[in-house]
Image (spheres, rainbow, N blue to C red):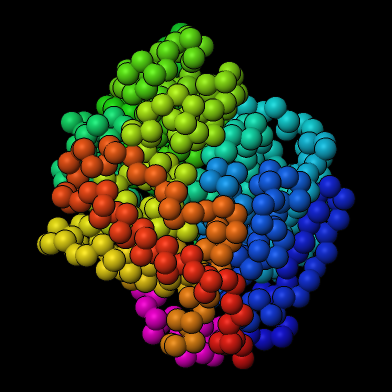
């Protein structure tokens, strides 16, 4: 890394004092490259153990990587923060133009603390922060409209990136999300092909791996109607790509709806879709009509909610109502029924408004709701995070539990189920090791801010060559040691903030509903968890100072 490389510029912003300043952090970027590697170090420095994630001092760290703008699919910005949802590590990756825009502004990372007492927004240009008034945007029901107004006021179209929250974020729903360039999110990532990740709907349903009606089944009788093929044929309006990406996996549906009482007048809404929201707001809720699924996705997008958490929470609430654990008195008169979209459209509004105790609790996640109302056996969350759409088997579920983010993207356990465990089982400890090895390597990709869809392309050999082109000279062993340091630093943060392998809960539903791979039980899962805990919760998980610098 060259001493003058702007990548090492970190912009610190204190919203409370309306102050910003630059610091050079070659020590971090030289050693950990950028992205997740630098992000976890900046988070650890600025977020002491036990800090309230919603406190003004709690930082949000945004980082980019040394390959942005140089190599294809190096397109992600990594957000690192203390999660208000799980209480420990929060990490999200988003693409769009965000990473290139931050690099073009002369920065490698941004650390934001403090709060605004008046409505405001931040504009960052040329490595400087400007604190601007947003009074006219306050209370807007649509984050899309707010984004449009900001676009009209800010310069540098094409290079700029706009990140914003919706009403769910304003109201502190713990699974609110941040959108960038309207169609990308700091949320959980997917893999894309011609049909986008939505091509997985029908195959997974056929295998019994598509969670349906709160995982009462792994097969959905209307999978074809909400499949990637059906959306591509009947609704696809555009395809988009993140900056510097030839894949263009982002699929946008055009939903044409008549205005009420207005013959021949239609409005067209453009809605981003992929596998995860279709699963969470489609099959998980039993909704068979593809246009109703799009409408619910649009509502969740406009409110600024995480689609997966929203769908899983509503699916749990529906089953809890069926079983009498939750009544209409709790919901304020709202009846939730699988397949009926109107209740769900009203439900996401109620979560966002936090309209009574029930909806406030559901806005803290399905574990919080089950702790209050019962129904833990069918509360589909792992490590405090609502499940992604893969009922594939033990590797998928262990992947959610053992991953630092409790996401399918940490280690792709769902892929091990489908490719390996369908051929025969392996000892629990061996499976845990496989998942950990995969996650350890992914620390390199996420520190270079490479899209995980490119993980088959960025092999260790190619990665070393790409790093050399960016000014980093290191061996394969040094790269592996750095990956291990980053991986352990994340778990050090989690453990310091209360994460405990022994307290991971496993909803019994996953053993009851036939999956792609069957025959696993709780004892098997606990052995794997104990093995990972021994590896990652030992004193070696303390933040180590790597001697493998890699700085040139
Ligand atoms: S594959 Fe998709 S998500 Fe990944 S960089 Fe390309 S367009 Fe973005």
Query: Front-most of 365 and 148?
Result: 365
x%, y% of residue 450?
47, 68
Query: Where is residue 419, by image quadrant?
Result: bottom left
Q: Is residue 49 left or right of residue 379?
A: right
x%, y% of residue 449?
52, 67
Query: Where is residue 224, by image quadrant?
Result: top left
Query: Front-most of 253 and 466?
Result: 466
Q: Is residue 495 left or right of residue 72?
A: right
The residue at 78%/57% (across/down) is: 13
Q: Is residue 128 left or right of residue 162?
A: right
Query: Front-most of 104 and 542?
Result: 542
The residue at 29%/54% (across/down) is: 525
Which residue reaches farthest left? 423
x%, y% of residue 307?
45, 38
Q: What is the count of numbered marks?
A: 0
- As for residue 467 lying within the magenta part, the answer is yes
Q: Quarter holding the N terminus?
A: bottom right
Query: Front-most of 473 and 228?
Result: 473
Q: Is residue 34 visible?
A: no
Is 169 placed above or below 238 here?
Answer: above
Q: Is residue 225 left or right of residue 452?
A: left
The residue at 33%/28% (across/down) is: 285
User: Which range of residues does the magenta coloring cover?
Assistant: 457-475
- As for residue 393 lying within the magenta part, the answer is no
Q: Is residue 372 visible?
A: yes
The residue at 49%/40% (across/down) is: 306
x%, y% of residue 391?
26, 45
């Amino acid at each position: 890394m060259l001493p003058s490389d702007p990548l090492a510029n970190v912009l610190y912003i204190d919203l409370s004092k309306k102050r910003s300043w630059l610091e050079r952090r070659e020590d971090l970027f030289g050693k950990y490259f950028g992205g997740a590697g630098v992000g976890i170090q900046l988070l650890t420095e600025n977020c002491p153990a036990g800090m309230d994630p919603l406190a003004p001092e709690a930082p949000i760290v945004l980082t980019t990587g040394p390959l942005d703008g140089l190599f294809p699919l190096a397109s992600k910005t990594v957000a690192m923060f203390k999660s208000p949802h799980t209480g420990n590590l929060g990490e999200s990756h988003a693409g769009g133009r965000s990473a290139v825009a931050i690099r073009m502004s002369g920065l490698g990372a941004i650390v934001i603390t403090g709060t605004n007492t008046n409505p405001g927004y931040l504009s960052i240009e040329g490595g400087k922060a400007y604190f601007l008034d947003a009074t006219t945007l306050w209370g807007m029901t649509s984050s899309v409209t707010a984004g449009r107004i900001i676009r009209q006021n800010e310069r540098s179209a094409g290079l700029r990136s706009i990140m914003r929250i919706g009403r769910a974020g304003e109201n502190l729903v713990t699974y609110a999300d941040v959108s960038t360039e309207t169609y990308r999110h700091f949320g959980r990532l997917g893999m894309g092909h011609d049909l986008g990740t939505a091509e997985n709907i029908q195959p997974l349903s056929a295998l019994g791996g598509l969670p349906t009606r709160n995982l009462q089944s792994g097969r959905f009788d209307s999978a074809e109607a909400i499949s990637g093929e059906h959306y591509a044929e009947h609704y696809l309006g555009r395809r988009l790509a993140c900056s510097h990406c030839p894949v263009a996996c982002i699929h946008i549906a055009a939903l044409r709806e008549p205005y009420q009482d207005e013959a021949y007048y239609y409005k067209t809404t453009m809605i981003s879709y992929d596998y995860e929201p279709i699963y969470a707001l489609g099959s998980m809720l039993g909704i068979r009509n593809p246009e109703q699924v799009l409408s619910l996705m649009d509502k969740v997008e406009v409110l600024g909610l995480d689609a997966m958490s929203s769908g899983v929470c509503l699916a749990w609430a529906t089953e809890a109502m069926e079983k009498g654990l939750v009544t209409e008195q709790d919901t304020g008169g709202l009846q939730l029924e699988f397949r009926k979209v109107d209740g769900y459209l009203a439900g996401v509004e109620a979560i966002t408004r936090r309209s009574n105790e029930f909806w406030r609790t559901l806005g803290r996640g399905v574990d919080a709701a089950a702790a209050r109302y019962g129904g833990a056996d069918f509360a589909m969350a792992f490590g405090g995070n609502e499940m992604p759409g893969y009922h594939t088997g033990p590797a998928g579920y262990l992947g959610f539990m053992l991953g630092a983010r409790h996401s399918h993207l940490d280690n792709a356990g769902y892929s091990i189920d489908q490719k390996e465990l369908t051929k025969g089982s392996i000892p629990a400890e061996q499976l845990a090791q496989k998942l950990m090895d995969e996650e350890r390597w992914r620390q390199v990709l996420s520190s270079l801010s490479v899209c995980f869809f490119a993980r088959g392309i960025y092999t260790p050999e190619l990665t070393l060559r790409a790093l050399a082109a960016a000014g980093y000279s290191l061996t394969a062993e040094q790269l592996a040691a750095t990956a291990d340091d980053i991986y352990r630093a994340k778990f050090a943060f989690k453990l310091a903030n209360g994460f405990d392998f022994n307290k991971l809960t496993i909803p019994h539903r996953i053993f009851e509903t036939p999956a792609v791979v069957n025959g696993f039980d709780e004892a098997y899962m606990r052995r794997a968890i104990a093995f990972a805990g021994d590896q990652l919760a030992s004193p070696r998980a303390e933040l180590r100072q790597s001697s493998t610098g890699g700085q040139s």
